[in-house]
Amino acid sequence: MRKYALLLLFFILTTSGNGQDKAVSPNSTTVFPEIYGFKNDSVLQVSEYIRRIFEDKAGNLWFGTNSDGVARYDGDSLQYFTTKDGLAGNMVMGIVQDKAGNIWFCTEDGVSKYDGKTFTNFTVKEGLSSNAAWSICEDRAGNIWVGTMEGVCRYDGKSFKSFPIPMADVENPYSRYTPKLVWCIMEDKGGNMWFGTDGVGVCRYDGKSFTHFTEKDGLVNNNVACISEDKAGNMWFGTRYGGASKYDGKAFKNFTTKDGLSSNEVYNIYEDRKDQLWFTTFGVDRFEGTTFTNFNKKDGLLNLAVQSILEDTKGRFWIGSGGGLYRFDGKRFTNVTKYGSWL
């Protein structure tokens, strides 16, 4: 039995490599990880760190990783795309699909557009202000916006051009990297573009002018990691060091660990089909309107470094962490491995 287990591990090690020609079938060997105790082994994880989760128009799930490129799950198999296949970089920090159906990825080494067959890459040579691309968004007009280590760029159909954002007046801003870094970009229902920065708050662009919101205006922290708009039209900002803020267009209401958040480091704020808000922090928190329900190790979430969350069109919840991929059934989290059950 021991010999058989070693042979099985060798088989997994030699068949789980990256590359467009390498695909694994998650539903074909469900029992083996549980029997032989390899379930949480890094060899079996989709990736050690799942930074982004995205569902395209065809229902494929895409998992942006910290070092293994991007993995696509089509319902039957898991397929990896890395720099060997033409992807700009193996650290994928943003995924979006444009109106034409192309999938865009922002990476540490540039931006990639995937048409279903080949990758087209954009770097500083094609107009990016920096190859370190951290955020990406398509607006209603079809423009692709990218936030980099050196500010914002906008795609005109051929190349990227710098889109300068005036710096907010923040005295001695604290940044993890640089105040020029734009962590996140989104367009609200009114067509305003929002940019979350590394130390100088959040900026709103209405098509003509810029408005800055910082701690002086009531924002809980100037390092804005994520932006979301709920169905009521409130803007939500998750910050790296201060918790979260809700902005109703007039004033900010702030939420921290004192209000029930698991951590003041908020990476993602997500609204599900039931209009419930989810916060990825030190674990996962569900907002009940006035209070938070915290999910962590006691609920099966073995790694609490959570960054990404998605409810797919089938109603399944997917969570990406620093310990791989998880699925949530409403009560418990289950670690989903390359060879575990995805059904």
Image (tube, rainbow, N blue to C red):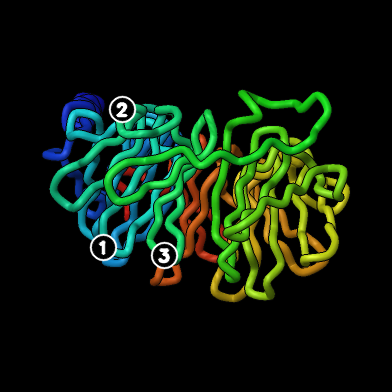
Marks 1 and 3 in Cβ contact (< 8 Å): no
Q: Residue at x 83, y 65 (%)?
A: 250
Quarter of the picture containing the N terminus is top left
Q: Quadrant of residue 102?
A: bottom left
The answer to the question of whether label 3 and label 2 lie on touching residues, with beta carbons closer than 8 A, is no
Instruction: Name which quarter of the figure residue 190 lies in.
Output: bottom right
Q: Position of residue 117 (x, y in %)?
A: 13, 48
Instruction: Compare marks 1 and 2 and give the one earlier in the sequence.
Output: 1
Separation of marks 1 and 2 at Cα, in angstroms: 24 Å
Residue 197 visible (yes or no): yes
To which residue does mark 2 refer? Answer: 125
Mark 3 Cα-neighbour bin, 10 Å: few <14, some 14–19, many ≥20:
few
Q: Is residue 242 left or right of residue 320?
A: right
Look at label 2 and name its amino acid.
Lys
Name the foreground residue: 260 vs 42.
260
From where the camera sits, is residue 41 visible?
A: no
Q: x, y (%) of residue 151? A: 54, 35
**Residue 50, quarter of picture:** top left
Q: Earlier in the sequence, mark 1 or mark 3?
A: 1
- Residue at the spot of label 1: 100
Sequence order check, earlier mark of 3 and 2: 2
x, y percent for residue 238? 69, 48
What secondary structure is marked by label 2?
helix
Which residue in the structure is indicated by mark 3?
141
The x, y position of residue 23, in whole percent, is 17, 43
